[in-house]
Image: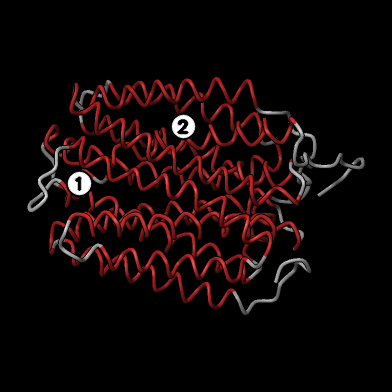
Amino acid sequence: MTVTAELPVGHRAGEPGLRRASLAVFLAGIATFAMLYEPQALLPELARAFDVGPAASTLSISVSTVALAVGLLVLGPLSDRRGRTGLLQLSLAASAVLAVAIALAPTWPVLLGLRGLQGFALAGLSAVAVAYLREELHPSVSSRAIGLFIAGNAIGGLTGRLLGGFLTDLGGWRVALGGVAVLGVACAVAVRVLMPPARRFVRVDRSTPLLRSLGSAFTDPALLMLYAVAAFLMAAFVAVYNAGTFRLESPPYDLTPALASLVFLAYLLGSASSPTAGWLADRSSRRLVVPVSVLVMAGGLALTLLGPLWCFVLGLCVLTVGFFAAHAVASGWVGARAALGGRPVGQAASLYSFWYYVGSSVGGTLAGKAWQGAGWTAVVLLAGGFTLATLLLTVALGRTRSLDPTQR
């Protein structure tokens, strides 16, 4: 990277810039995850409306996450050369327009095509949000702000799913998708007004070939393990929630879409656990917080095997707490590790998100097949395998050399 002048100090605690930046990225996270994962609450309804099976209905999510993952490989490096704020704002605006079009989609192939375009557009937020916060905020508050962004993801996922369930009962799946489109437009406007301009962004030297610059993010074993953590974490989480919708609307529970969507209130716990985990990581060790969070996630998954509805719901709550805590700390770890190692932060963060959404696509699709083939036990075995792989990786991460003298 080339630096032309001394950079200003990042926004500190108590400053208006910190509040505006944190709130803008928080709202962007709400909009992104509401639009991205809203169909999760509508899977049974979409399967009936378009006469497709449970496994095929999960494509309404997987096609978006695959396109998002591809978009990250383009937009992450682009943000290192062109800047963060404009890309994020354009991403939200385009995604909101596409959300309106998706609600009007006449056929299943058209809906899937529009969802793919929306996924690519949403990559703009995932590619730059963590890098923006890491650059623009003082190191003493950046982990907490990233935790707040992850909390916005959780609340957005909850909002999209709750709106989807209740609006489906009121007016069908088109009304549900339209309601989230309105939310997306409102958040896009708010982010445009609130987000402070970048003050600390440094362009990657354009004389460095893009592929060589991108390749540098693959030269650190710890970063490689963090990318794998992202994939396995998300594969397990999405597998449980995708198939969980079908389980709640099937015997012995037989819940309506509106009642089944209430289970996504567990995301509120995730919105609390992510900033808390970031706070703990700032004061203790990422190497401890991440594996403990994964163990919490595994305990929640085991609880869902018990028969009573309350056990299933409790298990989802515990799993959600563990997932968002682990993800919040791991995503911040990537940015910090890349910066300390002299690697492009935007590209490293994008690669983390790339594998995160690859995991979402794979886990979500395999969960539909597992549920269709062998029921909930097969889904738990699938998610449990992903969770065990994550735990082993986090233990290995704890033995890597730290580049940060303030973090053990």
Q: Tell me: 227 left or right of 231.
A: right
How many labels sit on residues?
A: 2
Mark 2: few/some/many CA within 10 Å (<14, 14-19, 20+) = many
Q: Nearer the viewer, mark 1 or mark 2?
A: 2
Q: Nearer the viewer, residue 248 or 39?
A: 248
Question: How far apart are labels 1 and 2 at the CA level?
Answer: 25 Å
The image quadrant where one finds the C terminus is bottom right
- Which residue is rendered at x = 53% and y = 33% of the image? 28
Q: Tell me: 31 left or right of 7.
A: left
Residue hosting label 1: 56
Q: Tell me: 286 left or right of 204.
A: left
Mark 1: few/some/many CA within 10 Å (<14, 14-19, 20+) = some
Identity, as a three-letter code, of the amino acid under mark 2: Ala
Quarter of the figure with residue 286 = bottom right
Q: Position of residue 19 (x, y in %)?
A: 68, 33
Residue hosting label 2: 31
- Which residue is rendered at x = 60% and y = 52% of the image? 349
Secondary structure found at label 1? helix
The numbered disc on residue 250 is none
Q: Position of residue 338 (x, y in %)?
A: 69, 59
In the rendered image of this protein, does residue 188 appear above or below residue 298?
above
Secondary structure found at label 2? helix
- Which residue is rendered at x = 56% and y = 42% of the image? 149
Quarter of the figure with residue 217 = bottom right
Could you tell which of marks 1 and 2 lies nearer the N-terminus? 2
Q: Tell me: 236 left or right of 337.
A: left
Q: Nearer the viewer, residue 336 or 60?
A: 336
Identity, as a three-letter code, of the amino acid under mark 1: Ala
Q: Position of residue 35 (x, y in %)?
A: 39, 33
Q: Position of residue 354 (x, y in %)?
A: 50, 52
Q: Nearer the viewer, residue 75 or 303?
A: 303
